Amino acid sequence: MSTFSGEQITQVNNPDPFAPPIWRSPVFHTPGWIIALVQLWRLLAAIIGFILRHPLLDLAAGVVAVTWLNLGWPGLVLLAVVVPGTLALWWRWRPGSFARFIARSVLGKWRRWHYRRHWAAVMTIGRLAPLYRGRVLLPELGKVSSTPYTDRVQVRMVSGQSAADFASRAPNLAHGFGAMLCRVRTGRPGALVLELVRRDAFAAIIPALPVPQHVNLRALHVGRREDGSPWLARLHGTHLLIAGATGAGKGSLLWSLVRAMLPAMREGLVRVLAADPKLMELAFGRGLFERYGAYACDPLAIVVMLEDAVRGMQARAALLAGKQRDHAPTAEHPFTVVLVDEVAFLTAYLPDKAVRERVKAALATLTTQGRAVGYCVVAALQDPRKEVMSIRNLFPDKIAMRLDEPEQVDMVLGDGARDRGASADLISSDPATGAGVAFIRLETDPDPVRVRAAWVCDDDIRAMTAKHAAGAQPGLRPVEAGAAA
């Protein structure tokens, strides 16, 4: 019979009665001097790693040490006065850079400490810490990035878990961490990001934004994102579909886009073709559109305007073929925005079937061929069903404002959007809290983001039209001449 020199441990105490027996080898005692060397090496590695991970803390400790050695207590007192004063002046005069380099970093570390305190309990009670061979395996808490409104918590999942496991437990996570809501964002393989909303950035109406001095057609400032950062909408190189029930705030978003493009419109680099079958929303700025593009409200006039735009787009494509692949707005070839309010009336509810088919054909041509040559279609509608808007999949970027039914969210933003947190059907119908609030899903990012558009009131539109339409410099060609572009 074999014998062992060491403590014989045969069976691990496993709380699972159905688990198979787990056998361990005999335990041999390691000499004390080897244990001491290993522990010393671990301590040294931990100290070096801490120093490398916290350069600012190392710098602060070095400054304190040098001050103490050279000036003693008076130097430390002076340091305690000068440093907070400098930080206060920095925050007062340069709040943006202070938030970027100081405030967000400090807030992120503080919030990470908060999550670390509750991590094990929330993961275990929320059934996201599986039991494997008698051991509880916790997902690994990673870096935390914070703003005054949201936290983005990086998580390394346990092998075998998926993002869907966390998405199904999102309400548990929000409650456990004391947040208003939690959304799960996809990350690299084996990891994800928990977006926890602590405060509502849209508790108050956002007033109309000032007209910018410079225009970036790939980043038009039209509102605010849920984390408090500016909402920068892209029009150049894409098409935009906006869906929302009556009173959801579609008009504010349309006017915010126009407002953000005004300087480029005055310079002749952008023209807007406005289709307004309701004769209500865009009619306030009719003078603005007629000065820098075209305006049409009669269905037949609208279809003529759209078909002229198609001819202009095709002529421009023939002219630029083989010369350039990306469009750059110029006075000769301006960026053209086709703005269509209540497009469902033109594509589904218009009694004249022939006109309906012509509108569909023109919009389909513009959305399939217009991106590369500087044409963008921005369409707004209330009913997002396929039979109402059969070409909705031709719009790369989509915005869902308040909708009537949960199913409509996936109709607008794509399958699975509501499961990812885009609860557009739960947006409040109270204009003070819900008007302008939306979820966006971009071509480059499958995760929906909650945003709110600035509110452009009637007085803002009148003042904007009176100032910019009246003071404009003539010289833009009419839409009918677009075929020569």
Image: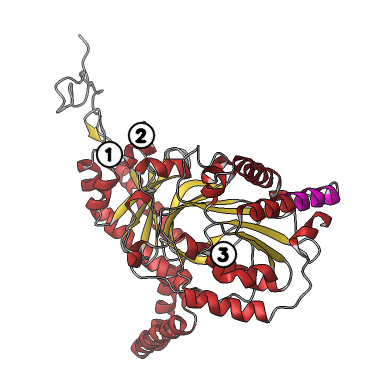
- The kind of residue on which mark 3 rests is Leu
Kindly identify which residue carries mark 3. Answer: 257
Q: Residue at x 69, y 74 (%)?
A: 266
Mark 1–mark 2 contact, CB under 8 Å? yes
- The kind of residue on which mark 2 rests is Gln
Q: Earlier in the sequence, mark 3 or mark 1?
A: 1
Determine whether, in the image, residue 66 is placed left or right of residue 119.
right
**What's the image's color scheme?**
secondary structure
Determine whether, in the image, residue 204 is placed left or right of residue 2.
right
Mark pair 3, 1: CA separation: 43 Å
Indicate whether residue 192 is drawn in magenta: no
Residue stretch in magenta: 310-320
Residue 161: mark in rendering: 2
User: Where is 66 relative to 381, above or below?
Assistant: below
On the image, the x and y values in percent for residue 247 come to: 40, 60
Circle 3: is it few (<14), some (14-19), or many (20+) Cα within 10 Å? many
On the image, the x and y values in percent for residue 269 come to: 73, 67
Circle 1: is it few (<14), some (14-19), or many (20+) Cα within 10 Å? many
Q: Nearer the viewer, mark 2 or mark 3?
A: 3
Kindly identify which residue carries mark 1. Answer: 128
